[in-house]
Image (cartoon, rainbow, N blue to C red):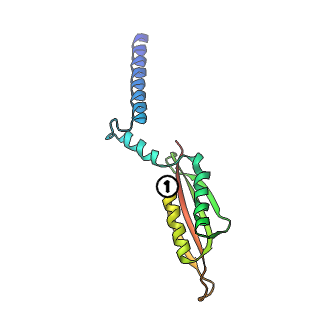
Amino acid sequence: MLLVEDSRLEQLTQDVAKEKKRLDMSRLNPEVDTHSSGAQLYAFYQFFPVQEKAPKLFKAIYGAAHDESISLAQGEYKYSLVKSGRMGVYQVNLPVKGSYIQIRKFIVKVLNSVPSAALEEVSFRREAVGRGDLEAKIRFSIYLSVI
């Protein structure tokens, strides 16, 4: 009985080693077996920046605001994990002031410089009809890989 269990344990250990080697190879060279669901899933998660890059992404957002001469009031940032646990998301709420064109260009620059950002909501408010500036509330979701 003990010999059968040892043989089965050895077989399982070999199977695990083979699978680990296959996964390591697909990580090093994603073109190996690109049709497998594991390789496709790996490529999907590789698109998203890792959580450690979040400060750089926020710097890009503030840089876009600076480029468009938009004043950013203090924003709200909320981090949470997606149900799968492999991704995190920052909900970023930014109250901004500027012209419609400035705010629109700001949003475009953010989406171009932070590809993992999604524009969730925009609302505009103008204090008086004749005024050129708008107050806007913008909400972005920035998705990050936590693998």
For the residue pair 7 and 82, the one nearer the viewer reads as 82
Number of residues whose C-alpha sits closer than 10 Å to that of mark 1, classed few (under 14), some (14–19) or many (20 or more): some
Residue that lies at the very extreme toward the right in this rendered image: 74
Q: Residue at x 61, y 56 (%)?
A: 59
Q: Residue at x 53, y 75 (%)?
A: 101
For the residue pair 134 and 40, the one nearer the viewer reads as 134
Q: Residue at x 52, y 72 (%)?
A: 104
Find residue 42 and report its horizontal and vertical position in percent: 42, 42
* Apparent side of residue 77 relative to residue 143 in the rendered image (left or right): right
* Apparent side of residue 99 relative to residue 35 in the rendered image (left or right): right
Find residue 65 and report its horizontal and vertical position in percent: 60, 66
Residue type pointed to by label 1: Ser
Q: Is residue 139 above or below residue 4?
A: below
Find residue 124 and report its horizontal and vertical position in percent: 56, 77
- Name the residue tied to disc 1: 116
For the residue pair 49 and 2, the one nearer the viewer reads as 49
Find residue 13 and report its horizontal and vertical position in percent: 43, 21
